[in-house]
Image: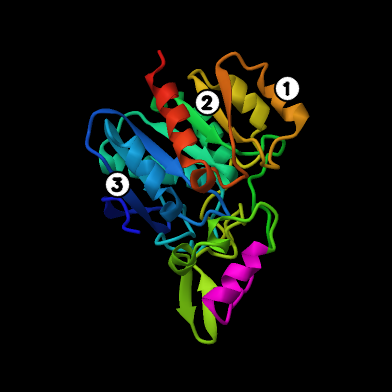
Amino acid sequence: MALAAHTSHFVPSGDVTLHYRLFGKPGATPMLILHGAAYFDSFDWINVASKLATDRETVAMDMRGFGKSTWSPSKDYSTDAKLDDMRAIMADRGWKKIVPMVHSMTGRIGIVFAATYPELVEKLVVVDSATGSNRGAGEGGPLNAAPTIYKTIDDLMAAFVRKSQSPRISHDRARAEAAARKVEGGYILTRDPDMGNTVPAWPGIRTPKLNDIEIWDALARIPCPIRVVRGLRSDRYTPEAIERLKAYKHLSMTEVDSEHDVPCQAPDALIATVKDFLAAR
């Protein structure tokens, strides 16, 4: 299947070079889409991004350490670095304000961004991201982890079939090939195995200040409207978290028929609820 028309761009940010895909033309407030840890980069968002770009520029970025973005040599995958990356893309596009749409691991990144830089955010969309922890998925992992080598693409796909709420990579060969890099002995993921490290390994690079922000307090500080999109068959939200979210008057929740991989399993429903949210005053 042909990919929706877009252009690729690269921009430096800290110790990495970020890659992002640009859709649409200038118009309404632009959207910046951040992928999750098991939804390996912007490739997973091409379909959704292209259909949200009918009246605005929309960017789907590769987070540092993922996809075509480079791996951080200092292993700086802190919240602070990721917020700086968002601002680097905004500066590259000349954007003054955005609508971030964040999924899974990056749910807390979008929430902290909107709480830290409220003047830069018009609205916020959080897609199936657990709110009960101050860490995103994958954060706090081992440092200097060796990449897993899969002998074949089939072996790589099979490894993710065994996971709960398995992502697109487990059943879509084109997607698996896009997430793989050929090395001696087989294939590794384009995802840095150290992507969970939140404190730079090199002294003096930075002292992160935002890693431990309490997510519920951050939600309360956000002044703009928030739309949470939850997969009905997902395992990311506890009943207690759902009830707690209802207490935030500036937050609305919609449910779509999917597991955690919302952009793959329920793209039309996701696009519809986001467009409805963007149109609301």
| Residue 59: image location, x then y, percent | 35, 43
Amino acid type at circle 3 is Leu
Residue at image position (59%, 37%) is 257
In this rendering, would 229 be left or right of 15? right
Magenta span contains residue 271: no
Q: Alpha carbon of mark 2 to alpha carbon of mark 1: how far?
A: 15 Å
Q: How is the image coloured?
A: rainbow
Upstream in sequence: badge 2 or badge 1? 2
Label 3 crowd bin: few (<14), some (14–19), many (20+), radius 10 Å: many
Residue at image position (45%, 37%) is 268
The residue where tag 2 is placed is 227
The circle drawn on residue 22 is 3
| Residue 195: image location, x then y, percent | 57, 58
Upstream in sequence: badge 3 or badge 1? 3
Amino acid type at circle 1 is Glu
The residue where tag 1 is placed is 243
Magenta span contains residue 147: yes
Q: Which residues are magenta?
A: 143-161
Give the secondary structure at mark 2: strand
Callout 2–callout 1 Cβ contact below 8 Å: no
